[in-house]
Image: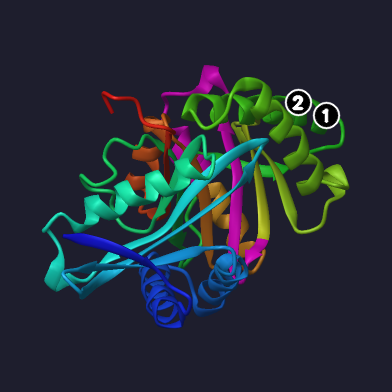
Amino acid sequence: MTAFTILDDSAAWRAGFEQRLRASYAAAGLGVGAVEHRLDEVRAGVGGWTVAAVTDAGTHVGHVAVTVADDNDTPAGRIVDLCVEPPHTGRGHEHAARDWAEQWCVERGARRLDVRLTEPAGELFGDYPVRGQLRTRAIGSPPEPVDGVTARPMTQAEYPGWLASEKLAYVGDIVRSGALSRAEAARKSDRDFAKLLPQDLATPDNSFLVLERAGEPIGTGWLKHGHLPGVTYGYSLHIQDEHRGKGHGRAAMAAGERATLAAGDSALMFTVWGGNEVAMNLYTSAGYRVLEEGRSIALPRSATS
């Protein structure tokens, strides 16, 4: 029978957890500096996590780590790790650990449970809807412009309209993913943009692009260089509605990749919100790997869940 014991000393689990994360991040194309930066971010939160040993008739079979914290005024639980060691997989311990984590979070008032995966969800978290993916790709040499699409810097006159459109699109992405209500998403959008762009168009280490084809604007791009060591983060690459369906999505990504290399970075990273299957398929076809995938469910589960 699967049993759970809260650990007073989680040092052994932490060493194995970091080793697994390091291997996963490296496999997704991050360099050493970016991998260690991601691990530092993870380490900053470890002190607030509860780690339980998973045992079967006294034999250690794995670990599960959980936490509950306020997120946009909603108590949210999170499974930060769930690992059953290979000799013991496929015997029901994974499901027992997931159920234990859900109940642990419910007992502490969580209304939502998140899980962030570095490997495919499989059946264990198959009923947790995808809320978003972090995709990344290492870039070797500057790609040639695709379909004649080029990029130029955004002008001051173009910035206010772009900002309003980006904030509205961000709210829509969050709501479509099912992560937050529209009111919650709007508050998050205001906070995030104020934090990310304190100097608007003059905010350092950001590129604001206007994508053009034959001199006609067809879209925009926003990139943050040095987001991680050697990594540019693509906040958005947007193609105007009337120009979609013409292959310009890949052209926009090529423009972002050229800007990434020009800024001295060697990898480009994007977030893809859940529900946006078109973007997910585009990133997959362009060689962008899933670095992390976020999924969540509402708590408590209904009787039919």
Regarding residue 133, the answer to whether it shows in the image is no
Does the magenta run of residues contain 247?
yes
Provide residue 108's location: percent of width, then percent of height. Answer: 53, 45
Q: In the rendered view, would you say 278 is above or below 71? A: above
Describe residue 213's horizontal placement relative to residue 127 as left or right.
right
Q: In the rendered view, would you say 159 is above or below 151? A: above
Residue receiving disc 1: 160
Direction top: furthest residue = 242
Distance in Å between CA atoms under marks 1 and 2: 6 Å
Q: Quadrant of the N terminus?
A: bottom left
Tell me, for residue 285, which label it has, or none: none
**Residue at point 26%, 40% (across, down):** 126
**Residue at point 60%, 59% (across, down):** 232
- Tag 1: Cα neighbours inside 10 Å, few (<14), some, or many (≥20)? few
Describe residue 175's horizontal placement relative to residue 300 as left or right.
right
Please name whichever residue, 105 or 32, is drawn nearer the observer in this view of the structure.
105
Q: Which residues are magenta?
A: 226-253
- Tag 2: Cα neighbours inside 10 Å, few (<14), some, or many (≥20)? few
**Residue at point 66%, 37% (across, down):** 72
**Residue at point 29%, 35% (across, down):** 127
Q: Quadrant of the C terminus?
A: top left
Provide residue 31's location: percent of width, then percent of height. Answer: 49, 75
Check if mark 1's residue and mark 2's residue have beta carbons within 8 Å. yes
Q: Give the residue type at disc 2.
A: Ala
Please name whichever residue, 21 or 166, is drawn nearer the observer in this view of the structure.
21
Does the magenta run of residues contain 117?
no
Q: Give the residue type at disc 1.
A: Pro
Provide residue 124's location: percent of width, then percent of height. Answer: 24, 47
Please name whichever residue, 220 or 113, is drawn nearer the observer in this view of the structure.
113
Residue receiving disc 2: 164
Provide residue 9's location: percent of width, then percent of height. Answer: 47, 80
